[in-house]
């Protein structure tokens, strides 16, 4: 017998039997599609904290247990054994590629990495000190004007080419955000290089010198991209899906995701972590700032701790912490902020205040330190996040296009405004 939940209106006595759906993992979901039709009601769920907005087979996370899976594969295994480009293939296609499939995938991405030459002119329209996320959102949206040949979203072949273009062109777009702000000439991609190495080449190479990045630096950045590739139905991913539900141009949907990611409560958190560590100044000051964070009367807050979903140690934070150690050791960098971060993590994880509230370090806590070690300015941190997350966005967009329940998103509201009233002429008010 199928499981149901009975909803009763105590005012009228009417009842509704709502079917319960079970996923592979996670809590069961109550199907309330008939709620308005049968009982004349909607649900009220600010922030959609208990609402499943879609079916998805891409990413699963369990915040209580600290689990993150991409297409069923644990993030720990992917981080240890895979590359970002292989993970992107997995997100989009649903399975890990064979060697031949991976070679073809890699080649196809390289063939799409160039952008139309006119797009480079868009950057010069921005102020020299414009925030890179503003530029990235604008340029990504503008790309929609240049690729009309394969934008039939109902055609699976067109959707796949669009996905390849998004994945391929984002490193190009992101690198130019950095080069423009730095007053450096733009650099064309080099197809002899790997995906991440190519991004670093386009971003950091000098016109008059050969450029070969450290293998440890390439791996650290590749790892960061893997950890940021997708994270279930977060704010930016949900925005991409909502925009996609209107059948908007997929590049415009990605631009909507970029804009949402820009918020300091979402993708901008790692930038805030660096500012916090700089304010703390030295490991000796950590205890004082921890005490301030515990004081309700003090406006200071520890950034990079806690998560909307994770109630246990963020599995990505464990991986990235090790990568941060390896990178700093290999590059022989004096990184005082890392010492502050380690002391802050040690004290917080031993403090009953943080343990009771399950405030563990999240992925943002260490990612900014790696970016800083790679000499990426803080203003570019969220651009790096967007570059990686665009892979997840386009995978989610493709899944939406294939959903049998595809329909335009239209949330409801609880209206608390004035009752109906008549217009009063200005002279009579």
Image (cartoon, rainbow, N blue to C red):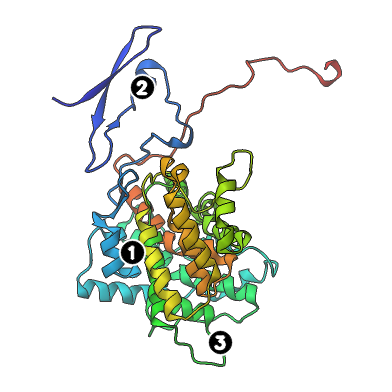
Q: Quick one: label 3, few (<14), some, or many (20+) residues within 10 Å?
A: few
Residue 354 percent across, percent down from the top left: 46, 45
The N terminus - image quarter = top left
What label does residue 240 carry, if any?
Answer: none
Residue at 45% over, 26% down: 44
Distance of label 1 from label 3 (alpha carbons): 29 Å
Q: Which residue is mark 3?
A: 206
Residue 196 percent across, percent down from the top left: 41, 75
Residues 106 and 272: in front is: 272
Please identify the residue farthest to the right as the structure is shown: 427
Distance of label 3 from label 2 (alpha carbons): 62 Å
Residue at 26% over, 76% down: 103
In the figure, 425 relative to 331: above or below?
A: above
Q: Secondary structure at mark 2?
A: helix
The C terminus - image quarter = top right
Distance of label 1 from label 2 (alpha carbons): 38 Å
Which sits earlier in the primary sequence, circle 1 or circle 3? 1
What label does residue 35 carry, if any?
Answer: 2
């Amino acid at each position: 017998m199928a499981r149901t939940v009975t909803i009763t209106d105590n005012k009228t006595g009417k009842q509704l039997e709502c079917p319960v759906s079970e996923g592979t993992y996670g809590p069961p979901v109550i199907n309330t599609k008939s709620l308005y039709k049968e009982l004349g009601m909607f649900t009220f769920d600010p922030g959609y904290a208990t609402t499943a907005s879609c079916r998805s087979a891409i990413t699963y996370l369990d915040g209580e247990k600290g689990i993150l899976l991409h297409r069923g594969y644990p993030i720990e295994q992917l981080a240890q054994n895979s590359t970002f480009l292989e993970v992107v293939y997995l997100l989009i296609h649903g399975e890990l590629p064979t060697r031949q499939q991976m070679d073809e995938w890699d080649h196809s991405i390289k063939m799409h990495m160039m952008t139309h030459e006119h797009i480079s002119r868009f950057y010069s329209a921005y102020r020299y000190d414009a925030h890179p996320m503003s530029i990235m959102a604008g340029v990504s949206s503008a790309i929609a004007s240049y690729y009309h040949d394969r934008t039939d979203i109902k055609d699976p072949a067109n959707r796949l080419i669009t996905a390849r273009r998004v994945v391929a062109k984002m490193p190009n777009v992101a690198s130019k955000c950095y080069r423009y702000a730095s007053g450096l000439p733009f650099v064309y991609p080099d197809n002899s290089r790997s995906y991440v190495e190519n991004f670093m080449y386009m971003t950091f190479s000098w016109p008059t010198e050969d450029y070969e990045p450290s293998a440890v630096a390439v791996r650290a950045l590749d790892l960061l991209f893997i950890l940021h590739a997708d994270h279930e139905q977060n704010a930016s991913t949900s925005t991409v899906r909502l925009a996609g539900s209107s059948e908007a141009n997929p590049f415009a949907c990605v631009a909507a995701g970029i804009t949402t990611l820009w918020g300091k409560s979402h993708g901008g958190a790692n930038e805030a972590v660096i500012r916090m560590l700089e304010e703390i100044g030295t490991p000796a000051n950590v205890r004082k700032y921890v005490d301030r964070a515990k004081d309700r009367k003090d406006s200071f807050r520890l950034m990079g701790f806690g998560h909307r979903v994770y109630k246990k140690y963020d599995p990505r934070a464990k991986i990235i912490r090790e990568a941060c150690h390896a990178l700093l050791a290999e590059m022989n960098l004096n990184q005082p902020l890392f010492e502050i971060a380690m002391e802050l993590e040690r004290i917080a994880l031993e403090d009953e205040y943080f343990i009771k509230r399950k405030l563990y370090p999240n992925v943002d806590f260490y990612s900014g330190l790696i970016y800083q070690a790679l000499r990426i300015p803080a203003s570019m941190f969220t651009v790096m996040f967007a570059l990686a997350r665009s892979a997840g966005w386009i995978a989610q967009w493709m899944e939406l296009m294939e959903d049998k329940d595809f329909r335009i998103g239209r949330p409801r509201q609880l209206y608390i405004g004035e009752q109906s009233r008549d217009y009063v002429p200005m002279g009579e008010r």
